[in-house]
Image: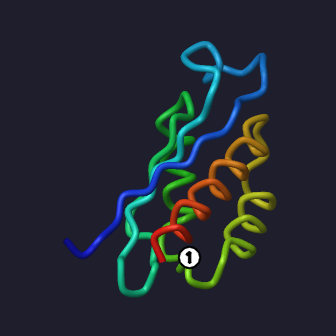
Amino acid sequence: MKTLFIAGHAKLPTGIAANHISESLTLTLEVDKTYGVIIDASCTLATEHGRGFIKSLLKGYSLKEGTDEPIARLREGYLGKAGNALEAALKDSYKQYQLHE
């Protein structure tokens, strides 16, 4: 197998649509083992549009370079209430990646 499947989790703020489904947000990443590049991403935001936006935002980044750049893009581009949870889930995913490395 040439990829890793990594899941990160974070608590969602109250009062948003996704919170009615679950109290936590899950971010999953499929990552190339050799280069650490995010090949695919998914999250448990309530709307398909939101999930697609996060996917397009994270695809192509290498976790070998850390999370500063994708977090900066997330802060700049995602203006929803789940922004902090998405950032925390990305950081949690990165921790899981570092344990493997």
How far from the left and from the top, in percent, is residue 39? 38, 69
Relative vertical location of residue 100 with respect to residue 43 in this rendering, above or below: below
Q: Amino acid at mark 1?
A: Leu
Farthest residue to the left: give it. 1
Q: Residue at x 36, y 58 (%)?
A: 5
Q: How is the image coloured?
A: rainbow
Residue 13 on image: x %, y %: 78, 27
| Count of marks placed on residues | 1
Q: Residue at x 72, y 41 (%)?
A: 85
Q: Residue at x 61, y 13 (%)?
A: 20
Determine which quarter of the picture holds residue 25.
top right
Seen in the picture, residue 29 relative to 85 is either above or below; the reply is below
Q: Which residue is mark 1?
A: 63
Instruction: Judge the density around disc 1: few (<14), some (14-19), many (≥20) Cα neighbours within 10 Å.
Output: some
In the picture, the quarter occupied by the N terminus is bottom left
Of 65 and 83, the residue lying toward us? 65
State the residue lying farthest toward the front. Answer: 99
- Image coordinates of residue 82 in percent, x first then y, are 73, 37
Q: Between residues 73 and 66, which one lies in front from this camera angle? A: 66
Rendered position, 37 above or below 31: below
Which of the two residues, 95 or 85, is positioned nearer the viewer here? Answer: 95
| Residue 70 drawn at (x, y percent) | 67, 69
Residue located at (46% from left, 70% from top): 100
Image check: 90 left or right of 87?
A: left
Q: Nearer the viewer, residue 41 or 92?
A: 92
Judged from the image, the secondary structure of the residue bearing numbered disc 1 is helix
